[in-house]
Amino acid sequence: MSLKDLLLQDLKDAMKDGDSIKKTAVQMARSAVLQVEKDTKVTLDDDGIVEIIAKEVKKRMDTLPDFEKSGRDDLIDNLKAEIEVLKKYLPQQLSEAEIENIVRNAITSSGATSAKDIGKVMQAVMPETRGKADGKLVNQIVKKLLG
């Protein structure tokens, strides 16, 4: 079953079960996927869908501090629940040690020696970590190892 089919099935199940949080999260992910497909006139494969879901998770993670500042516990709880729902569609996230390994290999293979080479290393690392690690974390590790 493709990821797109799984999203549709989970949406149907959430509607049957009356799970409004799961329904909302899956609907947002599906609409983002469909919008990208419509804009690019391309049918996305599972990797493309994973990228979009990762972006949806990142959006929610980025808005979480704003909600926490406002003190709206109901919104915070809903947002955290949506994040958990969407994370189930993402591949297993890499640990920091695994990311460091990938970055070390990229530094060696690209011949990077200083902070000026961050772009070169990131270009080599991102295809391996896309959807499996947060880009900010990867960037921090690259800076740490090159710094």
Image: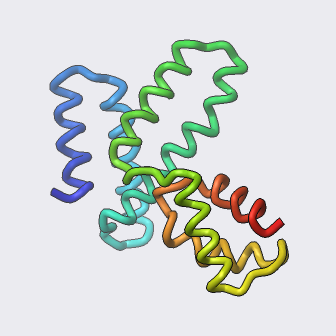
Spot occupied by residue 37 in the image (x, y as percentages of width and height): 37, 64
The answer to whether residue 69 is left or right of residue 33 is right
The answer to whether residue 110 is left or right of residue 49 is right
* Residue in the picture at 52% in, 13% down: 74
Compared with residue 120, is residue 19 higher up or lower down, i.e. above or below? Answer: above
Closest to the observer, 103 or 18:
103
Closest to the observer, 104 or 142:
104
Closest to the observer, 17 or 105:
105
Spot occupied by residue 4 in the image (x, y as percentages of width and height): 25, 55
Q: Quadrant of the N terminus?
A: bottom left
* Residue in the picture at 38% in, 36% down: 25
Spot occupied by residue 93 in the image (x, y as percentages of width and height): 45, 51
The answer to whether residue 95 is left or right of residue 10 is right
* Residue in the picture at 64% in, 71% down: 104
Quadrant in which residue 116 is drawn = bottom right
Number of labels in the image equals 0
Q: How is the image coloured?
A: rainbow
* Residue in the picture at 42% in, 62% down: 36
Q: Quadrant of the C terminus?
A: bottom right
Spot occupied by residue 54 in the image (x, y as percentages of width and height): 47, 51
The answer to whether residue 89 is left or right of residue 15 is right
